[in-house]
Image: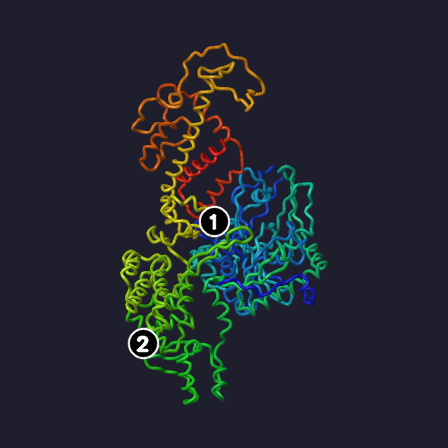
Amino acid sequence: MTPTKISEISRDDLNDHSLPASITDVKHLASYSWIETATPTIAVPGSPPLWTPQNAPQRLQKDSGLIYIAQNAARHPESPLEPLFRALYIAHPSFNLSSIDVVTDRNNIRKLLSFINPLYSRNHLEPFAIKIEIVKDTAIFCRVETAVQEVIGPHEFKGYGHEFEKKYTTNQVSNSTGHHRIISYRFGDMSFIIRHETDGYVDTASTEPSNAFQTEDKGLSGMLAAMSLSPPTRTATGLTIKREGQIVSIESTLEIKTRVFHKTIEMREVAPQLWISQTPKLVRAYHQGGRFQRPSVENVAVQVKKWEECNQTELAKLATLIHKMLREIKNCGGHAVVRYDAQADKLIIWKEKAAKILPDDLYSKWHDRINPEPPTGERESIDSAAKKAPLMTAIQVGDVRFNVELSRIPYLASFVKFRATTQPGITEFVHGPIPLFSEALKGIEGGYRQCFRCLPPDLSQHRTLCETYDFLGVDILNGQTIREIFNELRSCKADYEREYGRCRVIEGNKSTARDAAFKLLYLMLLGAFDGEIKNRATIFDAVLFLVSHPGTFKWKTRSIIRAAYEKRFVPSAKQKAGLDKWEKGEEDGDVTTDEENAIGFDSDSSARKPNLAAQAQDIDIIECGMEPIFQEQSLSPGRRISPNPTHNTSGRQLSKHLVHQNIAPALQHLKLRLQSSTQHLKPLQKEAMAMPEPLSSPNPIPPRTSSTGVTNGATYPPSTRTTVLKPVSEEEWIASSRKPHDSPTYNSHPHILSPKYPSVGDSSESKLCTKIVISNTDGMWCSEKEKILVGPYEYMVQQPGKDIRKQLIAAFNRWLHVPEESLAVITKVVLMLHTASLL
């Protein structure tokens, strides 16, 4: 779906502000800490690090290594906001989300505040984006970052902040990498839930021990949670939750800021951040060349309150801005992205079709509150009865009782209405048996993809199910054409868009694609086409796309779709061959979900690791101007490599394939470089024979001359010294005249080629290159000559630089997961080729 501009908001639009601009009724709700493990894991309630100051001045190393920019998105990209709600409902199982207007991270409010007044941002106002989804009356703000983490290299300087926190605080939860707190308060006649990261806390009496971990569950499970004995739980999205830590009061939390000693940290710089999270304590640490004096903890609650009083105008504009944003987004359907356009200096609201922000089960927290108990009382009329009737109506179909939402099943809605009209006061509705009604209801409530999971791969049963939907009046297609259904099928594939100079990954929506698969089945079984011949090619393209993506569609889905196509149409021999290419038996196993037959478990967002044969058709290569790299490979340019971090195993297999495919061209390129260097040596050899230097070696090397005949700025007289050895030809000088050995010999210089990794292929040219470059044969070759030959190369290699090539390789390897051994070879070859280009 192409983004549609909804509205623009400028600062001038916020002048009409009369809303209250103070924070009141601050409450601590929950907290959690991220744990360093192979899978996303949080500890609830966790604990911030304890402030443990050093008595003497400390000299620290500068920050280096991996630094998180947005740890929630980095560790749990499937749903960065899920840990917030999981921790909240562990601490408060019956929390009423319907009373909340905005759920957001502190960072989003800071960005909006910087738009109102750019002076609030120390680094000035930069482009930003916020994804917003409205559920009932609650707006969920999801932070959007072009990079969620960064790696600080050994030659980069980004300050001492992270090293200072490590030295002056002590983790209270083992392997904790960050503590996040969840608070609520009132602001601008709205209720907010704010999540923010906390740097630490001071040890006061307000800190409660872990056995004081309070939840609304006072039973055995609550006691186990307090004692950290309850087993970890795992959500459908792969988030592991364990009970560990202690509750720390808001009054004990602190923020840490570091800076060089001659630049003061002004209160006006940090006050907005402290105000949004209501953090009462601040540590301002100054250093001189990395040497820190003993810092102190300041209680800045009074200064933060004073800042709020002095900035009422801007804060009132903030409340007005949020109100205006929510009003516009509600009018456009409840899904939008707010972006700051630096050129226009405006906030622009775009309507975009995006994946859900939260897992499906968390959305029920709103619906449970919205659906009240059915009212009682007599019905005066059919209309009043409809108003009093609950959203879910109990009805018996055959021998089974169901609770159904009549608005989604027109036939049953008419049936209930007729019975209520003809039999006033009726409380039970009974209907005769309807074939496969239970399976049809699962498809209506959980998505049509559930139909494939409920039924065996029998085309006749699927036809019966489609006829049941038709009987119930359920509009499966909803007016969609075959091309629109095909577009939904293709929505399973990830996409990329440029955002502020970087590529942003747009995750594919497998749920929509799997629902579209059933729509395609319904269309082929019961649908009517305006022009069957005209749509036949499009339908075949859709069927071929579906059967060729086993990473998204299960074997049962693919087999039923193909059977339906061959039943409705007569495929040509070419079409049948194209479908046979992707034929796969059930015994090969499906790889799209963790639990194959778990009907109640929606596994659309959790994919297993597909095997290499299945993934070869789903893996695409990013189109970013790198086509020449793949021209000699079996993979064609223009396809994408999926960055899904869950496909680690297949990624390694594919990476090994790419390594072996690329090493031969790399060595061939190196050979050409060396042969070119050899050709350049011939005229120099002849010139050396004609113009010996005053200090000539046994085999003279000519002086460097200009185009006018001047040698190094001076003219040398003819040398009277005779050479001790006779001139040696280039072939004898570089390599021995002996025949090449059968087995590769070893070069004393490790940067040229490692014998552990022979070149791929058995070409005579590669063997000749190996002989010339790495063979240490008898004769005129010696270590001094090799030192002279590789001297310029050694010099260039030892010169420090940004090493952008190694950083790019490391970046791509976060997707490919190439083994360290192979990655070292690739990195070394790239270094050799780059250095050779400079010689």
Q: Element at badge 1?
A: loop
Question: Residue 139: where, in percent of width, then height?
Answer: 56, 65
Q: 737 or 358: which is nearer to us?
A: 737
Percent of width and height locating residue 567: 28, 68
Q: Disc 1 versus disc 2: distance between alpha carbons?
A: 52 Å
Q: In terms of depth relative to the viewer, which is nearer, 672 or 450? A: 672
Q: Within the image, what quadrant is residue 491 found in?
A: bottom left
Q: Residue at x 69, y 59 (%)?
A: 308
Q: Is residue 249 left or right of residue 394?
A: right
Q: Is residue 666 visible?
A: yes
Q: Examine the rendering and report whether any part of residue 522 can be seen.
A: no
Foreground: disc 1 or disc 2: 1
Disc 2 residue type?
Answer: Pro
Indicate the position of residue 330 as horizontal and vertical percent values: 56, 69
Indicate the quadrant where residue 589 lies: bottom left
- The x and y percentages for residue 663 are 38, 39
Query: What is the count of numbered marks?
Result: 2
- Residue in view at x 44 percent, y 36 percent: 828
Tell whether 438 sits left or right of 171.
Answer: left
Left or right of residue 433: residue 427: right
Q: Is residue 490 above or below residue 67?
A: below
- Residue lying at the far front in this picture: please name it: 708
Disc 2 residue crowd, few under 14, some 14–19, many 20+, Cα 10 Å: some
Viewer-side residue, 828 vs 120: 828
Q: Which residue is mark 2?
A: 435
Q: Where residue 520 is drawn, which disc sits there?
A: none
**Figure check: 326 above or below 305:** below
Amino acid type assigned to the residue bearing label 1 in the image? Cys
Q: Residues within 10 Å of mark 1 (few under 14, many from 20)?
A: few
- The residue beneath circle 1 is 624
Q: In terms of sequence position, does the residue under pointer 1 or pointer 2 come before the other?
A: 2
Q: Is residue 645 above or below residue 722?
A: below
